[in-house]
Amino acid sequence: MPTLSNYTKAITFGTEYLLKLVDGFDEEDWFYSHEESNNAHWNLGHIVEERTLFLQSIGVDVSPNSWESMFTFGEEPNEEQSSVSAEELIEALRQREKELVKALPYVKANMNLPLADEEWPIWDEFKTAEDYMNFNLFHEGYHIGQIGIVRKMRGKGRLM
């Protein structure tokens, strides 16, 4: 079973790695999309939105940013999303990171308790905080990987 330290490291590493990936991105980089892929801007907004949902699901009183619904599951990149600056997304990511790390002792102590919102997550397999936390780490890695592909396709090179 993962330890509290493992989760903290995974969240902070994911945040810092993502920020390194987008360091030096210009407007074209943020909104570059190859065929059917989501752009880096959408992926970052989606990670913020998913972190908010996780915090709410474990009972943390956190209000979503007014723009987060534009980045939810099933939404696709669109012009309206460009009203949210990359800087605002990065600031929100850092804020959610702090809130997640602060909530982790509660999550660890209550890993097997049901999630606060019985309608979320939409997959029946994720019923407890531990289930959802493990999924979220995978899910963030998936979207961070997509941002890494954008970085490489835009000629910015790989980090690792």
Image: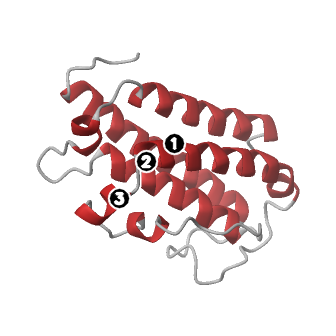
Q: Amino acid at mark 1?
A: Ile
Callout 3: few (<14), some (14-19), or many (20+) C-alpha neighbours within 10 Å? Answer: few
In this view, the mark in front (1 or 3): 3
- Quarter of the image for the C terminus: give it: top left
Seen from the viewer's position, the closer of residues 143 and 45 is 45
Q: Secondary structure at mark 1?
A: helix
Seen from the viewer's position, the closer of residues 142 and 21 is 21
User: Residue shown at 34%/31% (left/top)?
Assistant: 148
Q: Position of residue 117 (x, y in %)?
A: 67, 80
User: Residue shown at 44%/56% (left/top)?
Assistant: 46
- In the rendered view, would you say 144 is above or below 85? above
Pointers 1 and 2 in contact (C-beta within 8 Å): yes
- Quarter of the image for the N terminus: give it: top right
> Mark 1 or mark 3: which comes first in sequence?
3
In this view, the mark in front (1 or 2): 1
Q: Secondary structure at mark 3?
A: helix
Q: Which residue is mark 1?
A: 90
User: Residue shown at 85%/62% (left/top)?
Assistant: 110
- In the rendered view, would you say 47 is above or below 28? below
Q: Is residue 154 left or right of residue 44?
A: left
Q: Amino acid at mark 2?
A: Leu
In the picture as drawn, the residue positioned furthest to the left comes out as 35
Q: Amino acid at mark 3?
A: Ser
Callout 1: few (<14), some (14-19), or many (20+) C-alpha neighbours within 10 Å? Answer: some
Pointers 1 and 3 in contact (C-beta within 8 Å): no
Q: Which residue is mark 3?
A: 83
Q: Is residue 42 visible?
A: yes
Q: Which residue is mark 2?
A: 44
Q: Secondary structure at mark 2?
A: helix
Seen from the viewer's position, the closer of residues 90 and 4 is 90
**What colouring method underlies this structural image?**
secondary structure
> Mark 1 or mark 2: which comes first in sequence?
2
